[in-house]
Image (cartoon, coloured by chain):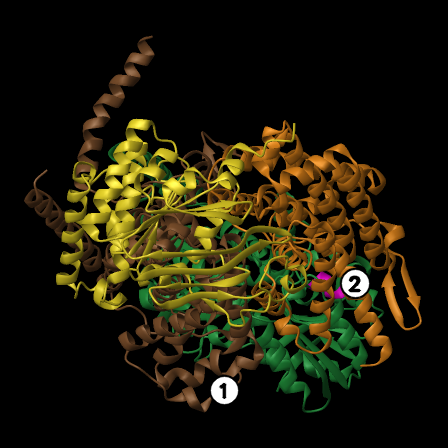
Chain colours: A brown, B yellow, C green, D orange
């Protein structure tokens, strides 16, 4: 395929996408659920790609994403909640005078959230990145629990509002803004992955010892990946805070990290497009497509006994196990989306059917 | 006498109670091809790993190009356990990590090929160029170093061309035939622009024909890139053919050193390889 | 090779989305619950009412009880007359899983279903999270048992039919004083705004006439309270105030008694739940709590509810004890219907206007809203557990 | 803090530590052999609680206990067969993710089957007898837990050191590939590991829940994580290490609360973990390994 064809196709795809988004945005009332799902997916996509940067591209098994999201979300919220409504947010214990008037414009507050997460990553990364795979996983998981415990503790009441959580967080003005922020974040990470540093990360994933022998400083590069990943997890946290408009420490439980990890696995470790695709698929199926499992099902007047609340999550986890066991590489493996791949697929489909027919004939 | 490039002094490497390398010293001068030989388990690769910074030696020091890059002495638990010589001679600890040592101009290959298997041949080489990059992570991400990036890629293409790997440029490294993987590993080491090239059994698993080709390849590379080469090898034909000097290790100790001719006629070496004849 | 893998991947995606697509179409058809066969009729004579409750997760148990009350109310009064036209009321239930992140999408789901109003939720945190969304969509919501002040504050679209935590905290503090307690220990769940909030209000009120000797918090999901309770025991309080979820309550009660703590144990509305007695057994004897409703304190209409609802519970294989939250669910539903009738319109914002001035005789007392949207309720029922049953003690008012 | 209070805290801590130790053994043994953090172990512990509830309801507690043990063991082995065995040749990360997936599945399944409401745990009358010694007050199970733990550990250590299967287990944990070549039936060894781990988790579950009295689908998550931390602190792969780690975590947690830092008791467990990993990544009893180049 010629390069120009590819560019034209890409532009066309983006245009169609934009048109769909604009249409949804214009008819906000009718497509509220779709918009919510797309927004949530976009936010999860940012965090999933940031996790993939570590787990899939650098080969560091980190389970601390929720902790960094929490740092980002709280930093953002503290700086972005309008000063006028702060008194009512901190109704129980009052607000610390230091942050009482610290209000930043929203974009700056989001970046501040990311930077704070990155700062924490820099501090803890130095010691814990020396640890090997599983130990690193469990240490980062522990870190994220520590963050949560500190945020919720009564000692932090005047800053994080302890158990009461934060609310009145400024929302996203519209769908397009969410997509735009997510797209910028993911684009930067893609640029990084394709840069010389990204190649060095991949080298570390492939073979640490060989990478080091090729002059790639392990600690320095792991640290860089960890900080950048945490920065975007922090931004993702800030986005989640804007999306939810009220947060508390329980939002950032280990389950959140697991959810993100599942997206990364289903999408394929080491594939950005896989993560993005999986973020949308997983969110949509969890929130919408599988919801009917939770409702009583009546077929011909007979109610099917299994359909009751909770079945949706069981079905979802079974699907997940199937992916983990039988499609270990996920949707995309380590590959990225290409037009050639897509067309190749279309060409294959007729063959697939042919193949089936032959088998049936036999 | 030409200029000294690598100076290894009294290096001892002890794992628990096992002394893998015992009081090993050697020198390599610029422009030489030096070989390290010895029976299996003699400690050759361990010595290599000490020199390249993978293991910190228990005792001893290594200098490269006039700079001391490694120095250590027994401490902690090793203080009691130490079974080597020259205890107390060294009092400083210098531990350069392998990447720093590579940056100084020492590049290596591995006994059991360690390529970046799932990446392409071109990427494998390009990654080795990373260490000379001046751009930081931001300028690199936002492509503010286009000129440098282009230069890196051009150099890689040139290198592939010289080494005859252009045809397989976009193949996945693990899909190459064995011999080519060996060549690629050497090419990757060369991409770091080393002064000293360390080859760990480059001819392992090769048939005689391939070994001859490899011999020529090493010579050619050495001349073209103005290298000093340090090689561990079992194929005696290759070693005797290309080496200027040879060091022989047995049970961690150096038992002989000299030119290929001297080594071939050295009784200790013959005993080590063939086993000492019992009195009859 | 690369392409084949990609192709395989994309085909997997397609397969999944096709599967999911089928699911989606099935979902939209079956998500209407109580309407039964009439759901298929569709069209303009159906009004949807959202039920925003946790059915799983930490508060899943309490949420389900609230849903029971709402379902029963819907069964009793399944149509509403607007003008001359009779509309069928259809419940749209969503599970917010006691989780704020889920709550947001669950709320959005209700908005997209174009419900005329929302009832719920058990647990204040999820209500606070969802409130902003209902406000944006201009859909009125009526909380049943979410007692945290933050739910309705600054939100014109959130109403509630129960009393608030500051009131409840004061009531319990007054009651504790009345039964002769001078030293109180407070035990709350970190990270839970209901628990910590109610605990704080209790403390503030109790400080006026007694001493807070211990103020401890425990982690969400904690199961071992012995160490915390040992600390409390050493301070020798007369009363332990431990507002918490149904899941943790029996653990606290049993472990306290096992440690030989004889102090009174008190809590808030969440504890009026048969599960606690079932779990804590004989140890539950003597615990005190405040609640919204008592079976004996109702009028004729209330009695009809009690007999009817008990029969309904029996039919569904549940215990024949009426939890207060079910009664609140029932009241919230009826309040919403009354407002719809009063508004005479299917426009949610008109219903919201109507709610402001609505006045309903509910089984938990008369319901009308103040400027904040909170029910003007000035009475709480204090209950205890005796012989394995909740027993009404007295009513408490705060001036 | 009066002496009495201090002793009561010690008792609580030791008893909690005993239960943690039993669960931690499951983690440490599986990690020793498969190099896998069995994230589902906490859930198996939780489901053992449900088994006990139903078994006791149907057969009384005397029969209920063996039934629970057997059912838990079967569950443990089935999980291994279905979720871990197919991934034996896969990268470590895949199998770990599979473990997370299993834990996710078991949690959702129990929520679906039994709802999120806590289920009362059956009372075993003998164990629940409350004793007062001086100012201390506790039920028998509180006293029994640490003692039973120690006895079981001695039996286990004997099995590992003096039986054929124990020797095979040690060999596999030292070198998976070589022991396979030496003719050790790897699958049998792994199954045995899961049998022992699950059985101990079931015993731990009975002791833990008898003492704490109700079970929810989330009862296993936090103890599971803490017990893994205990295993790491003790030195992963070492059975005595897991026991010591379990007691350390149990006692530290209790002491944190005793000192008035109840809000940080969980966080402290993880702080302890990170400190341990930094200064002695191999844990108290762990052995150092050198990567071959």
For image coordinates 49% across by 78% down, the residue present is A161
Which image quarter: residue D166?
top right
- Looking at the picture, tell me which residue is in the foreground, B270 or D289: B270
Same chain assignment for discs 1 and 2: no
Q: Name above or below for residue B237 compared with residue D248.
A: above
**Left or right: C395 as drawn, with respect to C24:** right
- Mark 2: which secondary structure? helix
Q: Which residue is mark 1?
A: A94
- Mark 1: which secondary structure? loop
- Looking at the picture, tell me which residue is in the foreground, C65 or A287: A287
Circle number at residue D14? 2
Circle number at residue D114? none
Is residue C251 one of those drawn in magenta? yes
**Left or right: B108 as drawn, with respect to C102:** left
Would you call the spot at circle 2 few (<14 residues within 10 Å), some (14-19), or many (20 or more)?
many
Q: Residue D161 at x, y = what percent?
A: 77, 41
- Mark-to-mark CA distance, 1 and 2: 40 Å
Q: Is residue C398 visible?
A: yes
| Quadrant (top left, top right, bottom left, bottom right) of the N terminus of chain A | top left
Q: Residue D275 at x, y = what percent?
A: 59, 68
Which image quarter: residue C137?
bottom left
Q: Residue D256 at x, y = what percent?
A: 69, 73
Query: Would you say the residues marked 1 and 2 are in contact, meaning their CB atoms lie under 8 Å apart?
Result: no
């Amino acid at each position: 395929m010629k390069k120009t064809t590819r560019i034209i196709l890409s532009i066309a795809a983006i245009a169609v996408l934009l048109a769909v988004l604009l249409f949804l945005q214009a008819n906000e009332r009718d497509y509220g659920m779709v918009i919510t799902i797309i927004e949530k997916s976009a936010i999860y996509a940012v965090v999933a790609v940031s996790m993939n940067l570590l787990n899939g591209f650098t080969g560091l098994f980190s389970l601390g994403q929720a902790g960094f999201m929490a740092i980002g979300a709280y930093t953002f919220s503290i700086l972005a909640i309008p000063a006028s409504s702060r008194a009512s947010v901190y109704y129980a214990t009052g607000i610390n005078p230091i942050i009482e008037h610290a209000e930043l414009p929203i974009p700056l507050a989001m970046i501040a959230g990311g930077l704070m997460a990155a700062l924490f990553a820099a501090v803890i990364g130095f010691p814990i990145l020396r640890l090997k795979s599983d130990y690193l996983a469990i240490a980062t998981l522990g870190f994220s629990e520590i963050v949560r415990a500190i945020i919720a503790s009564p000692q932090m009441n005047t800053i994080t509002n302890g158990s009461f959580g934060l609310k009145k967080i400024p929302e996203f003005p519209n769908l397009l803004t969410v997509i735009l922020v997510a797209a910028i974040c993911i684009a930067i990470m893609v640029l990084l992955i394709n840069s010389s540093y990204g190649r060095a990360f991949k080298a570390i994933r492939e073979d640490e010892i060989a990478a080091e022998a090729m002059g790639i400083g392990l600690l320095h590069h792991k640290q860089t990946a960890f900080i950048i990943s945490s920065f975007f997890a922090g931004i993702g946290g800030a986005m989640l805070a804007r999306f939810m408009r009220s947060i508390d420490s329980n939002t950032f439980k280990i389950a959140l990290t697991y959810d993100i990890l599942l997206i990364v696995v289903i999408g394929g470790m080491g594939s950005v497009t896989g993560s993005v695709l999986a973020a949308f698929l997983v969110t949509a199926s969890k929130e919408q497509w599988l919801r009917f499992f939770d409702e009583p099902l009546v077929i011909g007047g007979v109610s099917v006994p299994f359909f009751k609340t909770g079945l949706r999550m069981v079905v979802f986890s079974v699907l997940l196990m199937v992916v983990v066991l039988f499609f270990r590489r996920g949707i995309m493996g380590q590959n990225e989306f290409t037009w050639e791949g897509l067309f190749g697929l279309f060409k294959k489909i007729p063959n697939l059917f042919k193949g089936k027919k032959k088998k049936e004939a036999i | 006498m030409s200029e000294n490039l690598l100076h290894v002094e009294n290096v001892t490497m002890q794992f628990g109670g096992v002394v893998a390398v015992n009081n090993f010293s050697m020198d390599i001068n610029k422009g030489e091809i030096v070989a390290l030989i010895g029976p299996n388990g003699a400690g050759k690769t361990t010595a290599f790993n000490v020199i390249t910074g993978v293991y910190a030696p228990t005792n001893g020091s290594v200098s490269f190009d006039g700079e001391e890059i490694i120095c250590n002495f027994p401490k902690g638990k090793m203080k009691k356990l130490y079974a080597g010589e020259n205890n107390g001679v060294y009092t400083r600890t210098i531990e350069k990590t392998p990447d720093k040592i590579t940056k100084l101009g020492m590049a290596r290959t591995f006994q059991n090929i360690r390529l970046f298997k799932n990446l392409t041949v071109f990427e494998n080489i390009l990654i080795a160029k990373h260490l000379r990059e001046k751009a930081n992570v931001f300028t690199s991400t936002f492509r503010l170093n286009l000129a440098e990036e282009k230069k890196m890629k051009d150099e890689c293409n040139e290198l592939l061309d010289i080494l005859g790997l252009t045809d397989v440029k976009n193949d996945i490294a693990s899909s190459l035939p064995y011999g080519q993987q060996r060549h690629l590993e050497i090419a990757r080491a060369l991409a770091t622009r080393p002064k000293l090239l360390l080859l760990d059994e480059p001819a392992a698993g090769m048939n005689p024909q391939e070994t001859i080709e490899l011999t020529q390849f090493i010579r050619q590379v050495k001349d073209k890139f103005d290298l000093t080469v340090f090689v561990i090898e079992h194929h005696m034909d290759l070693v005797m053919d290309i080496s200027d000097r040879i060091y022989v290790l047995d049970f961690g100790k150096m038992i002989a050193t000299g030119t290929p001719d001297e080594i071939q006629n050295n009784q200790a070496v013959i005993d080590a390889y063939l086993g000492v004849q019992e009195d009859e | 090779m690369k392409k084949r893998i990609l192709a395989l991947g994309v085909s997997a995606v397609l397969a999944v989305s096709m599967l999911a697509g089928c699911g989606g179409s099935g979902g939209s058809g079956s998500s209407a619950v109580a309407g039964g066969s009439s759901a298929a009729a569709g069209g303009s004579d159906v009004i949807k009412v959202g039920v925003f409750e946790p059915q799983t997760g930490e508060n899943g148990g309490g949420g389900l009880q609230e849903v029971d009350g709402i379902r029963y109310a819907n069964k009793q009064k399944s149509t509403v007359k607007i003008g001359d036209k009779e509309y069928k009321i259809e419940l749209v239930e969503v599970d917010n899983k006691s989780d704020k992140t889920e709550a947001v999408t669950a709320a959005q789901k209700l908005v997209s279903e174009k419900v005329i109003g929302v009832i719920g939720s058990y647990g204040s945190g999820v209500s606070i999270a969802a409130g902003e969304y209902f406000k944006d969509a201009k859909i009125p919501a009526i909380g049943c048992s979410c007692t945290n002040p933050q739910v309705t504050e600054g939100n014109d679209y959130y109403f509630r039919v129960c009393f608030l935590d500051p009131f409840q905290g004061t009531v319990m503090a007054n009651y504790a004083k009345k039964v002769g307690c001078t030293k109180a220990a407070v035990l709350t769940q970190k990270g839970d705004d209901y628990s910590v909030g109610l605990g704080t209000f209790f403390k503030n009120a109790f400080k006026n006439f007694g001493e807070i000797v211990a103020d401890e918090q425990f982690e969400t999901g904690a199961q071992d309270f012995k160490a915390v309770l040992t600390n409390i025991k050493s301070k020798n309080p007369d009363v332990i105030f431990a507002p918490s979820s149904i899941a943790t309550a029996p653990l606290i009660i049993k472990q306290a008694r096992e440690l030989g703590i004889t102090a009174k144990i008190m809590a808030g509305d969440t504890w009026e739940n048969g599960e606690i007695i079932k779990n804590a057994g004989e140890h539950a004897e003597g615990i005190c709590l405040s609640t919204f409703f008592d079976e004996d304190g109702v009028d004729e209409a209330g009695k009809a509810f009690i007999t009817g609802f008990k029969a309904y519970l029996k039919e569904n294989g549940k215990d024949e004890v009426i939890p207060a939250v079910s009664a609140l669910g029932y009241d919230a539903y009826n309040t919403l219907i009354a407002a719809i009738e009063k508004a005479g319109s299917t426009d949610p914002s008109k219903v919201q206007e109507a709610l402001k001035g609505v006045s309903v005789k509910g089984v938990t007392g008369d319901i009308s809203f103040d400027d904040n949207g909170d029910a003007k309720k000035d009475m709480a029922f204090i209950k205890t557990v005796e012989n394995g049953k909740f027993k009404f003690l007295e009513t408490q008012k705060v001036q | 803090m009066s002496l009495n209070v201090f002793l009561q805290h010690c008792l609580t801590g030791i008893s909690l530590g005993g239960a943690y130790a039993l669960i931690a053994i499951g983690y440490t043994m599986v990690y020793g052999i498969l190099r896998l953090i069995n994230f589902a172990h906490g859930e198996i512990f939780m489901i053992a609680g449900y088994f006990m509830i139903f078994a006791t309801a149907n057969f009384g507690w005397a029969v209920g206990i063996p039934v629970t043990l057997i059912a838990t063991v079967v569950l443990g082995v089935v999980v291994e067969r279905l979720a871990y065995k197919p991934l034996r040749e896969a990268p470590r990360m895949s199998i770990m993710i599979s473990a997370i997936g299993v834990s996710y599945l078991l949690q959702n399944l129990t929520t679906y089957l039994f709802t999120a409401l806590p289920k009362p745990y059956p009372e075993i009358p003998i164990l629940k007898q409350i004793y007062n010694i001086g100012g201390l007050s506790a039920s028998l199970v509180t006293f029994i837990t640490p003692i039973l733990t120690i006895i079981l550990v001695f039996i286990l250590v004997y099995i590992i050191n003096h039986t054929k299967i124990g020797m095979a287990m040690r060999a596999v944990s030292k070198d998976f590939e070589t022991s396979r070549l030496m003719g050790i039936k790897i699958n049998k060894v792994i199954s045995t590991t899961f049998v022992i781990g699950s059985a101990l988790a079931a015993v731990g579950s009975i002791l833990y829940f008898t003492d704490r009295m109700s079970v929810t689908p989330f009862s296993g998550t936090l103890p599971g994580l803490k017990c893994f931390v205990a295993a790491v602190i003790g030195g992963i792969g070492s059975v005595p290490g897991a026991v010591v780690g379990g007691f350390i975590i149990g006692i530290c947690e209790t002491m944190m609360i005793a000192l008035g830092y109840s809000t940080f008791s969980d966080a402290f467990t993880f702080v302890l973990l990170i400190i341990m990993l930094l200064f002695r990544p191999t844990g108290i009893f762990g052995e150092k390994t050198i990567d071959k180049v």
